[in-house]
Amino acid sequence: MSMLELTNIETYYGPIMAIRGISMQIEENQITVVLGANGAGKTTVLKTICGAMDPQKGKIKFDDQEIAKQDPDQIARRGIGHVPEGREVFPFLTVAENLKMGAFSRSDGDVDQDLDTVYEYFPILKEKHHQQAGFLSGGQQQMLAIGRALMLRPRLMLLDEPSLGLSPRLVHKITEIIKRLNTEQQMTILLVEQNAKMALDIGDYGYVMELGRIVMEDTCERLRTATDIQEFYLGMKDEGVRGRRRWKHRKTWR
Amino acid sequence: MEVVFQLLLSGISQGCVYGLIALGFVLIYKATEMVNFAQGEIMMLGAFFAFTFISILELNFFLAVAATIVSMAICGALLERVVLRPMIGEPPFSVLMLTIGLGFLLRAIAGAVWGSEPKSLSAPYTGGVFNVSGVIIGYENLVIIAGTALLCSLLFVFFKFSRLGIAMQAASQNQLAAYYVGIPVKRIYSMVWALSAAISAVAGILVAPVSLIDPLMGFIGIKAFAAAIVGGFGSLPGAIVGGLIIGIVEQFASLYLPPGFSDVTAYVILLLMLLIRPEGIFATMQRKKV
């Protein structure tokens, strides 16, 4: 049985249909990736899962329990951590306070221990634990956002474009951390990315979205070798005789 | 010289009251981005509650103060839950109209329940004075200043060190992120309203022995609103400082300027402030990212 199961989800922004009937299964201990261009609806899927948006139709089952239309804080308490797009830290709280807020819903005594774990993953946060989060650099804020979600001790972690706006070196570092979380903490991860290469490198199973629909799904291994993926997302194109591509071969799902 | 001290002292005590009501404005604005124009009326209600507990039910003074604060906190949370929560997501102007209407409603209710003739509240410390080399200090004024100082330090500790206080700040800084980490934002909003109403109730209790209690006393809320803007709407220390400035200048204006000027000083300061430094003294507002 899958840990998280979406069945025929439809989500609207007012009159605009952003998600046009999506079904997904996220298996335990796996890294599932969602690829897609801007406006494909990737972020909306995550927002629908974590309760920030309500689906008009469809079912969301986490551990076989329906969670659609619950408040986001209740869903978070069930063990779904969310690293939102654009980091969204609490700018006027210190780094340490930000992290402690991540554990707000927990009442067990292991919070300090988890704080150490987060500092171990991200030593820079320990160094700056007394600074206001708003003054951190983009990469540090991203680490803080991931650390804050870790403090919830989630069973499922939703990551929304963690590589957005980061240097290649930082992207590499964040990728390493995601892999470590998956292997060391047995954390299930749903990763939404535009950086297809990075996502397909670490992912186990992948979905490709376009205009609110899933147009392709397969194991990441097979997705990496699929010609459409290579062409549209990995930038590898077979060139024509005169070094130009023929429009005949251009493919779109629209 | 004594006159200056005398004015300064009464200015500070009056300013404390403005500051406390301004604190209520700012708390609610920071957390929920709504401006509650019924803040003055909530203070008035607090004063009437205190009057009921002390003069009608004849409770022990401290017990009555505690009862007033608790019951006003409950009232605040109820107001949020019943009247304002359905307005989440509505345009700010509708919320503004709603709270202005709420003010009218509370005035009418107070008039119907307690009558519109002014009442006086007697606290155990009423009437006593210190005489420090010609400067006469009423106990009531001292209690206002001490009470405000105490309340402010309690609030400081609460927001700096308690989990709930930090969560309130978190919810006001980034509502969505607060949801994502599992903070029950809606419940936090109710608690912010409760806290704000409780602070206003304290202001009501403190001011009641020096002024009279009547349904129209809530109009000083407008001056407190000016104080909140002068302090930089969105800053808690700014609210108190803004209140003190307006309180002190008002007292001096009443002596040195022609009669009638003292009532408009709050707005003159407000206008000057908006001309010179529109973001207020303690500008903490960060530009909102879209």
Image (cartoon, helix red, strand yellow):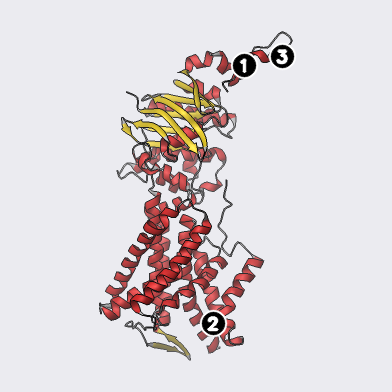
Residue A177 relative to residue B53: left or right:
right
**Residue for badge 3:** A244
Is there a contact, CB below 8 Å, between mark 3 and mark 1?
no
Q: Residue at x 59, y 70 (%)?
A: B270
Report the mark closest to the observer, 2 or 3: 3
Q: Amino acid at mark 2?
A: Gln
Measured Cα–Cα span from mark 2 to mark 1: 77 Å
Q: Chain of mark 1?
A: A
Residue B43 seen: no
Discs 2 and 3 lie in a common subunit: no
Q: Most extreme residue toward the top, as rendered?
A: A241
Secondary structure category for the residue under label 2: helix
Please identify the quadrant where the N terminus of chain B is shown: bottom right
Between B251 and A48, the one nearer to me in the picture: A48
Discs 3 and 1 lie in a common subunit: yes
Q: Chain of mark 2?
A: B
